[in-house]
Amino acid sequence: MAMAMAMSRSNAGRGIRLMSTSGWWKAVEPAPKDPILGVTEAFLADTDPNKVNVGVGAYRDDQGKPVVLQSVREAERRILGKENMEYLPMGGSVKMVEESIKLAYGENADVLKDKRVAAVQALSGTGACRLFAEFQKRFRPESQIYIPVPTWANHHNIWRDANVPQRTFHYYHPETRGLDFASLMDDVKNAPNGSFFLLHACAHNPTGVDPTEEQWKEISYQFKVKNHYPFFDMAYQGFASGDTDRDAKAIRIFLEDGHQIACAQSFAKNMGLYGQRVGCLSVICDDAKQAVAVKSQLQQIARPMYSNPPVHGALLVYSILSDPDLKALWHKEVKVMADRIIGMREALRGNLENLGSPLSWNHVTDQIGMFCYSGMTPEQVDRLTSEFHIYLTRNGRISMAGVTTGNVEYLANAIHEVTKSSEKELKAGAV
Amino acid sequence: MEGQADRDGDLRFQPTAGSAVSAFQHLEQAPEDPILGVTVAYNKDPSPVKLNLGVGAYRTEEGKPLVLDVVRQAEELLIQDRSRYKEYIPIAGLVEFNKLSAKLILGDGSPAIGEKRVATAQCLSGTGSLRVGAEFLSKHYSQHIIYIPVPTWGNHPKIFNLGGLSVKTYRYYDPRTSGLDYEGMLEDLHAAPPGAIVLLHACAHNPTGVDPTQDQWEGIRQLIRLKGLLPFFDSAYQGFASGSLDADAYSVRLFVGDGGECLIAQSFAKNMGLYGERVGALSIVCRSATVATRVESQLKLVIRPMYSSPPIHGASIVATILSDRNLYYNWTVELKNMADRIISMRHQLYDALKARGTPGDWSHIIKQIGMFTFTGLNKDQVSFMTAEYHIYLTSDGRISMAGLSSKTVPHLADAIHAAVLRLG
């Protein structure tokens, strides 16, 4: 009683201030700007009329405008006024997840028939990767993750925050601006048996460099020899070649070889649902019973993170994938996006060659997907920004989705300007 | 774990991790979530008189989920605005939504907002806001212990543990009075180490429905400030508890009014009926604007590796409603209707038990506030009610008043009556 009475009697009650006047957060340092998203912020702040944003990987049409797919607008129209907004289960929309894994593994995949896939709705690709990283930490606490060099910067953050130690493996070959296949295979062979590897299923981010089908087969074979665990991040299915089956080829090869893989899927780019945060994490298991167990454990990770995933985006994805007409329309629209990007690659390369650049620009059309790893140095990138108001990440990654018939010449000129006299570049390019 | 492969042989039929064994062979099926598991069990029951009083989602008098009129109107407005694209929103969420959410909980003229001392990030409902807050604290705050009340929402300890904090408890509910153990609470908080974090339910405590009085809140505030403890508010029922947004924000505003710092997790799941859209906000009230800016930048580093940026849809709906005077006003009316219906259910249930002469003091049913009533029934009585009367509730005896209607109150009263008589 005494304490309670003392508290309520205190006349100076409302005058009691904090014990410490300086607050608890004085020691908090300002965080560095996100290297990718910070680029768009800077672009938006620039008032120059010629400014070009080839930073963040969000699709733009040839007018440089963001696009909402027709199939998405139709799906929105269909669900308007009908959503009841109840909580989804922890594992998300079962119907959406079923469609999602059909898309990834192929409608007639044995793993689906045998119900061996544990799958949950996730918060786009990031959320799917994070769920897997936490799952890996919980059930394979001794394991590490091998991450390609380079990779999407946030991959490092994700596995770090999940407390999974990281190692790297060779991937990009700066001299050829292609795949360093020999070193990649060496790293696969030298890693301890049973290592976990992060693989980009298609349209590698940031380089756009993908293994060929033959190379994927060799990688898969070596993974079998070494009993490695393949985790695929598939953020661009359909977006790379225009064909969803073709873009999932690596995964299908691994499945044929009997690997039990895990896969993070994102609908941010291929359905243009960026802000809806829709994705899927799937883990292939021994049998149906284990799949049920694995799914239950994935749910246990989701529950204390966000309880259950958002319903709106899931309904959009399900509406599109489950309706044959909408799905067909969507496939067409994805191909249009992919084709436009391929066209811009050709245009950019053509322009640079016509300008008489002494460097080789084959990689612009050899690489695939949203990004082109130009090979430009940070200093050259800085010049592009300060002199030409062209915004991209300092690793020289150009988002081809931001290139249009209206700005490709300007872009080519600028790139030519900042690279034409680089000795190092000349040496590297002269193959 | 040597590779079993014969290089000349066909590896096709040997799964990864050799010897035909999965990398996750050893893992076991997780137990059902105790709260969400209730609905799973309810769904399986074929009985026509079954009643779901488990999860806290509002139901109408007809037992149906409710989508607010203002929400439907906001959706119409949003879909018609073709200039809206579905791009990524910022890591910390929609700017407009964040401003409006902070204003809603802190009050229009809050000096903390005027002085730009509040860092707000849109998060995935209450759960997401709590988790982001916990991870932020574990990375940047010197104390990693959080005190939670007994009892509390079942998901709280897991959120904080996985967020990197260790969990201790303070006394809260007094089963003898079915009310607050105020003295016990103060004693336990007094014994906490300086700087420890304290989880406070802003109103409509879940699962008990027992809230401190205004005087008691003042006593709690004084003690917390005296001991230099850091308050972390979970505000999941603003407007939903009493029907008044301001009244339900009393505790938070009391603390912020003394100039001190705190964290606030807001959910729009119940008060806007946006459950599945996962809309919420984490606000950190700081001592200065410069600190708030730095705090916001660090929040982004917690969010980015978790899900990059929050979902756009639900937050857009909330921002549309909060920023439009008519929609806002209509929302307050709909909110009051929901709160009033729940209060009415409380009275009806209390009256029904009195009418049956059910042994015991049931006045806590009308004293407690918010979505839930902590009946005081034990596990066995709960099991009995499920088995014999097809009534589904969590084993701690918590019932969701929102799941009741005038038609179903008699059935529940019968079940409680029988349970108390049979197993009392």
Image: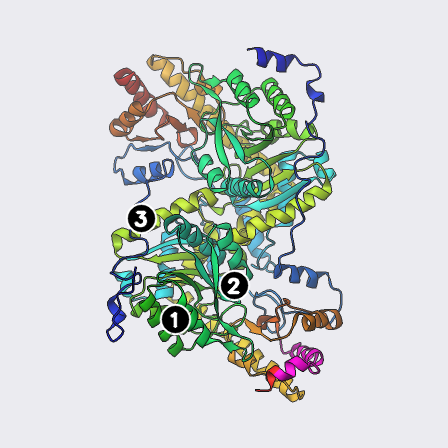
The x, y position of residue B372, in whole percent, is 44, 28
Mark 2 and mark 1 in contact (Cβ < 8 Å)? no
**Chain letter belonging to callout 1:** A
Front residue of B180 and A24: A24
Q: Which residue is mark 1?
A: A250
Amino acid, disc 3: Leu
Q: Which residue is mark 3?
A: B27
In the image, which disc is placed on residue B125?
A: none
* Local SS, label 1: helix
Q: Is residue B160 left or right of residue A406?
A: left
Q: Is residue B89 left or right of residue A71?
A: right
- Magenta: main secondary structure: helix
Per the rendered image, the range of residues in magenta is A404-427
The x, y position of residue A207, in whole percent, is 54, 72
Amino acid, disc 1: Ala
Q: Are marks 3 and 1 on the same chain?
A: no
From the image, which quarter does the C terminus of chain A lie in? bottom right
Q: Please give the name of the residue rendered at 28% of the width and 29% of the height, measured from the top-left corner.
A: B386
Q: Which residue is mark 2?
A: A272
Q: Distance from label 3 to label 1 (Cα)? A: 28 Å
**Chain letter belonging to callout 2:** A
